[in-house]
Image (cartoon, grey):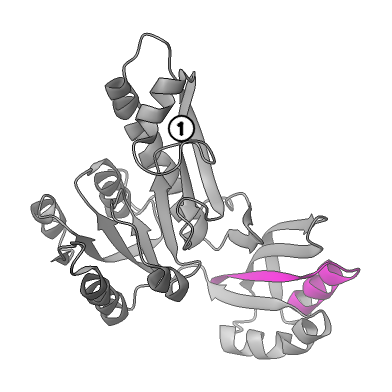
Amino acid sequence: MSKYCLTVTCPSQRGIVAAIASYLSETGCNITDSAQFDAVDTGRFFMRISFTSETGAQLPALEEGFAETAKAFDMTASFRDESRKRKVIIMVSRFGHCLNDLLYRWHIGALPIDIVGVISNHMDYQKVVVNHDIPFHCIKVTKDNKQQAEADQMRVVRETGAELIVLARYMQVLSDEMCREMSGRIINIHHSFLPSFKGANPYKQAFERGVKLIGATSHYVTAELDEGPIIEQDTVRVTHAQSAQDYVSLGRDVEASVLARAIHAHANHRVFLNGNKTVVFPASPGSYSSERMG
């Protein structure tokens, strides 16, 4: 039995949940998981529903039949097959911990994604990537060829049909044009607990301030550096006895896990943009299960 999900955003008003539930029931669908949020500050309503079709209804028919309800509530609504994996391009420079973590999670089926290529401005991880039977693209970036390099990167994205770009410690600032074209479809990991310590060398900044917690932040990329809507964050405790280099080492595991959780949420259609913030719903039962144990 196919498992689908419906995501909805619209102005907040009475009767939304009842209308959606009635439509799904009338079309022979059974709701298996549901999450909703009414954002009082923006007046927006968000909902994600997992459901199965007990009558064999297909997505095109469900979408067509829902159009009248969507129009009545001014909804932006999307029906998706939960078994379909999103195509992802990973971009990396010379720090490989996030890349290696994502490759392992992808290998065991713990992330609902299809890695269709890895782009790097260095050759460090070519062998690791091709050993996973994933295409590797080395695209050098300098201050003189940045525009052409980004054009080459976007060519790879288009040719592979990638729906998401993951910056796994890719240490180049993307242009405003690339950020706009891929708005809401680029996820970055920043090695700091934003909004503190933006830009370069955040661990050094944290060390100099004597913080007792360091962390990592995964966010959508916008033209404003490290200002994109935050998806996931976590921290690790440090003390006065640790060096700036210790901060870097301690931060690696946090960065990898935070990035993976953000990708998992995005790939499962659990993240909704709400102005400059996000609404992130909890994972549905069973969505963290892996195809293989290791």
Compared with 156, 279 (above or below) is above
Amino acid on which disc 1 is placed: Gly
Given the current orientation, which residue lies at the most extreme right position?
Answer: 14
Q: Residue 23's x, y, as percent?
A: 78, 79
Question: Badge 1: how crowded within 10 Å, few (<14), some, or many (20+)?
Answer: many
The quadrant in which residue 84 appears is: bottom left
Looking at the picture, tell me which residue is in the foreground, 195 or 31.
195
Q: Residue at x 54, y 41 (%)?
A: 195
Looking at the picture, tell me which residue is in the foreground, 141 or 215.
141
Q: Which residue is mark 1?
A: 215
Compared with 244, 100 (above or below) is below
Q: Residue at x 50, y 36 (%)?
A: 193
Looking at the picture, tell me which residue is in the foreground, 244 or 61.
244
- Say if the magenta span includes residue 22: yes
Q: Residue 100's x, y, as percent?
A: 24, 45
Given the current orientation, which residue lies at the most extreme front position?
Answer: 144
Which residues, given as a range, are shown in magenta?
3-24
Q: Secondary structure at mark 1?
A: strand
Compared with 94, 56 (above or below) is below
Q: Quadrant of the N terminus?
A: bottom right
